[in-house]
Image: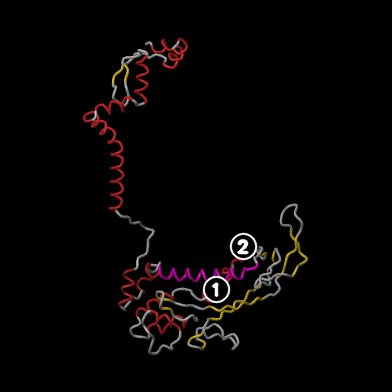
Amino acid sequence: MPFRGRLGVASDFAPIHDLFLADGDVHLIILRSDALVHLEKTTDIWYRATVETNSTYRPAAGASRRFFWLPDEALSPMGCVQRLQFSYGSEHCGPLAGTWDAFAGLARCLGSPPGGDFDAEMFSYFRAVEGSDRWGTFADLFHGAALDFGTVIGSQRAEILLPQRSRRGSVVLPVPDNQWQLDVTYWWSTALASLQAAFVQRAAGPDVPELSQYMVRPKGPFSRQMCDSQKILSSDYSSFSVLGLCLTYAVGAAIIVASYAIEPILALLGRRRRRYPFLEWAANETLQLQRAAYQGIGSGSWAGFTDDIPRARRGEPLANLPRHYVEARKRGPAAAAAP
């Protein structure tokens, strides 16, 4: 990892002059695949396996036998350059550089230009400057995250490779031609997830209660303000708005009551104020029309001519209305009109 144009002491290896970059972190990842065999020929530039073996396998019952494939090289190296850039808003951005220089550029974005003994290695320079509280707060968060590929790969080792998860013993399942790109994308997604987890852990505190006594409270005004203003959603309980819940129930209950009360209220007002329109409206209801049909043939003694449901006398039988009108139609118009 370079810092201000020279190699930092935190680097795992010292690259030669041709591989050294002053504006980026050079990572060298070596894939060891000498003990693996592939089910299919692989042309990915990192997982390349194009050496056909004499061993065969049958993918399914009744299928033709296929050959296993060996990796072209026992050790397959891949070089990767990682650059970070931090921005504060849309107008304040630091340089696109390696990890340490990107952190140094973050100070300018936050309005805390570095000074003093800023050449100190590792994260000791985070607190070397008076007045860099805002910068140091964010730097501590980044320190707790695994942003560089070296930390991401070192924490998970072979499990960081996606084909490793679908491997069966020493047999590797089919690998796409861009598998190395998928792996690097996964590494960067893991680094971003680690950064998000660092913010959550800072707000939630340590998972082990015994570690609480070793926590160092923030001293600067910005770090204290940020610590006090952070909130983390707990799974132990849930919060909700009592006012919103009460309003929801109240409005819902009012709508239900109104839907049941509006019809009888309008019926009562119609009986008193608009008697003839109400009578005509009630007489054309389906059940009232059926009552009128029975009355037309002299069947039943009816009551409730303006109610929703007209009522015949209890126990009084009614005529077969459809049959009556069919027989009356056969006898002629005069018979159909007669009661």
Residue extending furthest toward the left: 272
* Residue type indicated by callout 2: Ser
Disc assigned to residue 37: none
Q: Secondary structure at mark 1?
A: helix
> Residue at coordinates 37% horizontally, 64% vertically from top-left?
232
* Residue type indicated by callout 1: Ile
Query: Which is nearer the eye, 319 or 150?
Result: 319
Q: Quadrant of residue 257?
A: top left
Q: Quadrant of residue 39?
A: bottom right
Q: Which residue is tagged 1?
A: 153
> Residue at coordinates 74% horizontally, 70% vertically from top-left?
51
Q: Residues within 10 Å of mark 2 (few under 14, many from 20)?
A: few
Could you tell me residue 338's position as x and y percent? 38, 10
Could you tell me residue 159's position as x and y percent? 57, 68
Q: Secondary structure at mark 2?
A: loop
Could you tell me residue 83's position as x and y percent? 51, 78
Q: Residues within 10 Å of mark 1 (few under 14, many from 20)?
A: some
Query: Which is nearer the eye, 194 or 236?
Result: 194
> Residue at coordinates 33% horizontally, 83% vertically from top-left?
131
Tell me: residue 98, above or below residue 56: below
Q: Which residue is tagged 2?
A: 166
Dominant SS type (magenta): helix
Could you tell me residue 294's position as x and y percent? 37, 16
Apparent side of residue 229 relative to residue 86 in the rendered image (left or right): left
Apparent side of residue 237 relative to residue 59 in the rendered image (left or right): left
Count of numbered circles in the view:
2
> Residue at coordinates 74% horizontally, 60% vertically from top-left?
57
Q: Is residue 180 magenta?
A: yes
Magenta span of residues = 177-200
Circle 2/circle 1 CB separation < 8 Å: no
Residue extending furthest toward the front: 333
Q: Earlier in the sequence, mark 2 or mark 1?
A: 1
